[in-house]
């Protein structure tokens, strides 16, 4: 007798009358089988994948047992009382539903729904490696227990009329005020966590049919899908009125079928099981039309801030780059849809190209599996790398699906997958559960991923590791790669906000400085990571010494949303929200030429708790294997907070270096606090093996090592030893400047020492007044950061530009390689409305297409284009060459010129 039977599993006898009707035939069994391939393991997988047996024996079997025992032990109280999950007590609720006891019961009920119920389905549908290894597999008592739980959930209001008009729990009151009547439960506040319920009903469709319950729960699944407010853009023609209560009526045409990152993820999780359960032919045709329109509208490169994939491949959410959260899971949802519907006419090559671009772009932005916290929105994750690699995990799964021969069989994705994936890392015991784990009520995203990985794994077919410079204008960011290291730069502008950190949620509440010219090095750890590179956010991290930034150094203290809003009101700050603010500048971005390039930011600070007028011009030149950081025009700030430019802040631990300055203090980890006077030079190392050469500064440099005390975003006290260096501009500087060079992975500082001995061999700053003009003699590269439309010195090839631009040239034998961009998207905006933050930007910039700038670049002398480009104009005027180069989306345009004959 099985373990289930021995435990006396008899709670669910004859649910629904023990009917034994045959399972309903699905309209497309092939598609259903393919979906099950995503969700379930097969016995053959335990031989094909080395991870699958460990997953079953070390993770799944125990979870199956827990689910069965939890379902048996559940009290099943409050039966017949609708559950309400809303931010405000519903007007129509019974008094009993608002008691503390009801809230506690609802908490338990949610756990039953989002965790126990889905796991029962997997317990029933997952075979073990050998016959009898999973005692719950195909066991009738488990199916009956599943149905019993489902019937109890129905009695608590999870019915075909349950409400889910939003995911914040605030729309239901508005719907009631509009005269709509709720007749069942309300799951608004937890509606993002019901995907496992929908998925499990699909998996259990045959036993539910035998029990005479499938038709009933098909209606429940339809309701949870079609009437979910987050997906209203897809189902607006079919949804009930309460689902659209938060949308303008009629729905504007530009929002038809559009879903944000949340909506796309929910669509993949909810719609596919629902679609596969449909029996009515007309309903299936209607839903297939919706599927086609959703793919066309969302699996695409979209202008403005609406949608997820931008022209440079950046993933979006909440109106800006969300590289480390939300967007990667949306990419995975796209890949799932492409896998499931491969070989159909539901998508085209442009849809595939968009997803491929997004996945490739993500790879350039991470090292190895962690994303800079400046690009994770409010979701910083834990301090351990395994808590912060979830975005990379989603992208790797997406690559495997794109590459799989049962799907698209994409050879480029297979090569990139094999470059990016490391089985020793992801299949290590402490990370194994995360590889198949779902999110938001999806206890398991899919066990079939182990089969897909085994099928596409071919290390010999791996692509080259990304190298060089990548400018991502829609992220206001740049990425510089060589070998195993990555340098990330980040800014913000009037188009893209500074940071997301809702104080009331205690998420990233100290994130004010992330986008003030971040220059973050990923060069240490195994694999290389943010925490491994010394940026340990939950261990004494000084949130206001973000590497690279020029910003006010605020105190790290506990703050409340109400307190900050009141402080801002008293200070006369008009901006509505402390987070997600835009400044008035547009010049942020850069240009690339081969393996080199540079990033620019016309920095204008926004106020936090006090008025500020801090501004600066910050440029990062990525040439060779190092970065020249150039900052000028640093002036203003708050009345009481010093302005600092941070070179580095890295944690000192056992096994790391200690950091040094001019060759001193590196042999021990004792406390240090020393100062380098303005105008002096210095060489430094951090604790992660990177070196720095300070060539010039108009303010003193501080070098410190010691124990720091800090707070987490949740205000838990933390501490850790760090070494840090920063330029102390003091209170309200009046035109400060600096020049320093960062050399990643220069463990002993030998490169920095050689640079200090002869800096002119690497770079020469020609102009740092109205532009940043730098020559790199060893590479024959000249970089022109035209913050203003000024004329250069007579010995420069590029004399002038017609609008602020970024231009870079490299001289070769008889020809010059030139690249140019306009780091300004050219969106129309309203200065008077910028203070409204995201509520303004999400509307103003929603669907704006970037302007096409006709950039005129004047070259001294007579030149001709080597390979004709019909989009590039060329005229010789008075012995000079005028190039007219179209520039759009902040992307670089490259060409080669040679002396005209």
Image (spheres, grey):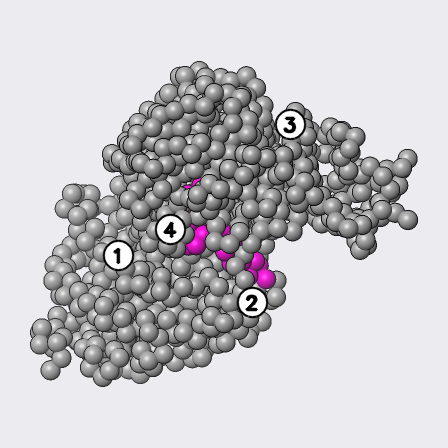
Determine the CA span between mark 2 and mark 3: 43 Å
Nearer to us of marks 1 and 2 is 2
| Residue designated by label 1 | 157
Q: Give SS at disc 2.
A: helix
Within 10 Å of disc 1 (Cα), the crowding (few <14, some 14-19, many 20+) is many
Q: Which residue lies under the disc numbered 2?
A: 412
Note whether residue 828 is visible.
no
Identified at 40% across, 74% down, the residue is: 454
Q: CA distance from mark 1 to mark 3?
A: 67 Å
Would you name the residue on which mark 3 appears? 768
Q: Is residue 253 left or right of residue 662?
A: right
Alpha carbons under labels 4 and 3: distance apart = 37 Å
Per the rendered image, the range of residues in magenta is 353-376
Reading the image, the residue beneath label 4 is 525
Relative to 453, residue 643 above or below = above
Of marks 4 and 2, which one's residue comes earlier in the chain?
2
Looking at the rendered image, the disc whose residue lies closer to the viewer, 4 or 1, is: 4
* Residue for point 14% across, 75% down: 4
Residue 367 visible in the displayed image: yes
Mark 1 vs mark 2, CA separation in Å: 48 Å
């Amino acid at each position: 007798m099985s373990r289930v039977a021995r435990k006396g599993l008899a709670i669910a006898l004859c649910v629904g009358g023990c009917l034994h009707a045959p399972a309903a035939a699905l309209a497309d069994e092939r598609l259903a089988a393919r979906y099950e391939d995503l969700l379930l393991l097969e016995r053959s997988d335990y031989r094909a994948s080395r991870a699958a047996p460990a997953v079953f024996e070390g993770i799944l079997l125990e979870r199956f047992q827990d689910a069965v025992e939890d379902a048996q032990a559940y009290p099943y109280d409050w039966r017949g009382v609708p559950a309400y999950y809303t931010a405000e007590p519903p007007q129509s609720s019974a008094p009993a539903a608002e008691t503390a006891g009801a809230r506690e019961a609802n908490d338990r009920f949610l756990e039953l729904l989002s965790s126990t119920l889905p796991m029962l389905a997997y317990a029933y549908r997952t075979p073990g490696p050998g016959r009898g290894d999973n005692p719950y597999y195909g066991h009738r008592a488990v199916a009956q227990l599943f149905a019993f739980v489902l019937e109890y959930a129905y009695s608590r209001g999870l019915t075909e009329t349950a409400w889910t008009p939003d995911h914040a729990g605030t729309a239901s009151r508005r719907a009631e005020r509009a005269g709509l009547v709720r007749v069942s439960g309300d799951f608004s506040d937890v509606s993002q966590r019901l995907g496992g319920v929908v998925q499990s009903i699909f998996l259990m469709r045959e036993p539910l049919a035998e029990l005479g319950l499938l038709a009933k729960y098909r209606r429940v699944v339809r309701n949870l899908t079609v009437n979910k407010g987050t997906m209203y853009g897809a189902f607006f023609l079919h949804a009930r009125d309460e689902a659209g209560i938060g949308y303008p009526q009629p729905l504007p045409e530009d929002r038809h079928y559009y879903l944000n990152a949340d909506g796309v993820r929910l669509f993949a999780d909810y719609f596919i099981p629902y679609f596969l359960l449909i029996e009515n032919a007309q309903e299936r045709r209607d839903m297939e039309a919706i599927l086609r329109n959703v793919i066309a509208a969302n699996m695409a490169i979209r202008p403005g801030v609406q949608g997820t994939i931008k022209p440079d491949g950046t993933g979006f959410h909440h109106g800006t780059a969300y590289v480390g959260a939300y967007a990667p899971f949306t990419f995975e949802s796209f890949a799932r849809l492409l896998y499931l519907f491969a070989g159909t006419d539901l998508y085209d090559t442009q849809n595939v190209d968009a997803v491929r671009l997004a996945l490739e772009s993500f790879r350039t932005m991470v090292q190895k599996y962690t994303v800079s916290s400046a690009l994770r929105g409010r979701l910083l994750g834990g301090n351990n790398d395994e808590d912060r690699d979830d975005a990379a995990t989603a992208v790797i799964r997406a690559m495997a699906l794109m590459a799989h021969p049962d799907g698209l069989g994409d050879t480029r994705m297979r090569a990139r997958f094999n470059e990016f994936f490391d089985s020793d890392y992801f299949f290590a015991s402490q990370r194994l559960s995360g590889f198949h784990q779902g999110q938001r009520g999806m206890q398991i995203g899919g066990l079939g991923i182990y089969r897909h990985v085994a099928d596409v794994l071919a290390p010999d077919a791996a692509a080259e590791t990304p190298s060089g410079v990548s400018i991502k204008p829609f992220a206001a960011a740049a990425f510089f790669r060589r070998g195993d290291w990555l340098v990330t730069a980040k800014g913000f502008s009037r188009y893209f906000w500074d940071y997301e950190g809702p104080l009331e949620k205690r998420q990233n509440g100290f994130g004010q400085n992330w986008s003030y010219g971040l220059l973050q090095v990923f060069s240490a750890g195994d694999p290389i990571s943010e925490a491994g590179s010394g940026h340990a956010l939950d261990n004494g991290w000084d949130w206001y010494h973000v590497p690279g930034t020029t910003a006010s150094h605020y105190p790290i203290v506990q703050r409340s949303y109400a307190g900050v809003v009141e402080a801002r009101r008293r200070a006369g700050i008009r901006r509505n929200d402390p987070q997600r603010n835009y400044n008035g500048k547009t010049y942020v971005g850069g240009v690339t030429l081969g393996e080199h390039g540079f990033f620019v930011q016309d920095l204008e600070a926004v106020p936090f708790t006090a008025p500020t007028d801090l501004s600066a011009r910050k440029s990062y030149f990525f040439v060779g294997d190092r970065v020249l950081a150039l900052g000028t025009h640093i002036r203003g700030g708050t009345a009481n907070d010093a302005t600092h430019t941070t070179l580095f802040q890295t944690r000192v631990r056992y096994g790391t270096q200690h950091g040094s300055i001019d060759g001193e203090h590196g042999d021990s980890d004792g406390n240090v606090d020393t100062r380098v006077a303005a105008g002096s030079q210095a060489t430094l190392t951090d604790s992660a093996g990177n070196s720095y050469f300070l060539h010039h500064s108009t303010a003193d440099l501080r070098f410190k090592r010691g124990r720091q005390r800090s707070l987490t975003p949740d205000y838990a006290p933390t501490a850790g030893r760090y070494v840090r260096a920063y330029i102390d501009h003091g209170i309200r500087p009046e035109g400060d400047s600096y020049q320093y060079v960062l050399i990643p992975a220069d463990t002993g500082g030998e490169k920095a020492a050689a640079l200090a001995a002869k800096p002119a061999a690497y770079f020469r700053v020609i102009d740092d007044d109205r532009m940043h003009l730098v020559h790199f003699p060893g590479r024959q590269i000249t970089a022109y950061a035209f913050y203003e439309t000024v004329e250069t010195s007579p010995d420069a090839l590029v004399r002038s530009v017609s609008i602020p631009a970024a231009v870079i040239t490299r001289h070769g034998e008889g020809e010059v390689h030139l690249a140019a961009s306009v780091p300004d998207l050219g969106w129309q905006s309203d200065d008077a409305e910028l203070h409204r933050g995201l509520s303004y930007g999400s509307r103003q910039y929603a669907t704006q297409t970037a302007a096409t700038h006709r950039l005129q670049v004047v070259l001294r002398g007579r030149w001709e284009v080597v390979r004709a480009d019909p989009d590039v104009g060329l005229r010789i005027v008075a012995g000079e060459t005028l190039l007219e180069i179209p520039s759009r989306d902040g992307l670089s345009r490259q060409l080669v010129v040679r002396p005209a004959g």
